[in-house]
Image (cartoon, helix red, strand yellow):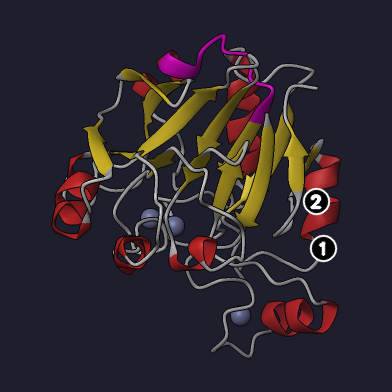
Amino acid sequence: MRVRMLGTGSSDGWPNPWCGCASCAWARSAGVLRRQTSALVDGRVLLELGHDGVRAAVDLTRVEAVLVTHAHADHHALPAWMWRGWARGTRPLTLVGPPAVVAAARAELDPTVTTLEVRAGDRVEVAGYDVRVVPATHAEADVGPAVLYDLTGPDGARLLWATDTGVLGEQALSLVEGRAYDAVLLDLTSAHQPVHHDLDTWPRQVEVLRAVGAVVAATAVHAIHLGHDNPPDIDDLLDGWGASAPRDGDVLEVGR
Ligand SMILES: [Zn+2]
Ligand SMILES: [Zn+2]
Ligand SMILES: [Zn+2]
């Protein structure tokens, strides 16, 4: 499974373009620009439909499924559907998302798009991928209920896409128990507690995931959805926890 990170930042991005804080100043001077978090899996499955992801100059013409976790604008930018409607030769595509996402999209979709409404605990197959739906600790029915995705590819590689979320609840942990992911990508916004992770909860969450067998020795653990409340030395901190933060444009080879 090949995961291209179209963005790795929080909704405002890191640096936040309006912000003069030291963290944003560092990001600008270092040229580490993180746009809204989204990823393209094997060129076929798009995780999140934010403005930035569809503007990342990546070819989306082969995308067969779009998986959206919730209806916040950095994850579900409605104009993206309109732009798709202006494209020529679009192929059939399935939008997977919780009820609020499907409801918001409905008026914007052209006939090539099929919708698949999901809730925590569901398991669906889409574009040859086995998708299990895990509840997020993030937002209620008005934008979701927000979910996370456990995705197994046709090659057997398995990843957990876990943004946006705070500390996982009992149901989420029971669903990820024993899954021994090849990769876990976990929210590290470092703001807006308790519906995102910060530098206190993130390493503890990884340990909990390890304790239930979701993270094992071979699991690559990554931080995503990073915002400017993280410090410039975030790479060193993550390194100390055996993890890393991929940057925009990075390609992760998952399961090799
Ligand atoms: Zn977000
Ligand atoms: Zn800032
Ligand atoms: Zn959100």
Can you say which quadrant of the picture contains the C terminus?
top right
- What stretch of residues is rendered in magenta? 175-183
Q: In front: 91, or 5? A: 91
Q: Amino acid at mark 1?
A: Asp
Please tell me in which quadrant of the rendered image residue 56 appears: bottom right
- Residue 61 position in % (x across, y down): 51, 50
Answer left or right for 21 relative to 27. Answer: left
Q: Amino acid at mark 2?
A: Leu
Magenta stretch holds residue 160: no
In the image, ligand 2 is in what quadrant? bottom right
For disc 2, the marked residue is 237
Residue at the spot 35% in from the left edge and 63% down from the top edge: 77
Answer left or right for 197 relative to 14. Answer: left
Q: Residues within 10 Å of mark 2 (few under 14, many from 20)?
A: some
- Residue 192 position in % (x across, y down): 43, 61
For disc 1, the marked residue is 233
For the stretch drawn in magenta, the main secondary structure is loop
For mark 2, give the secondary structure.
helix
Name the residue at the top extreme.
178
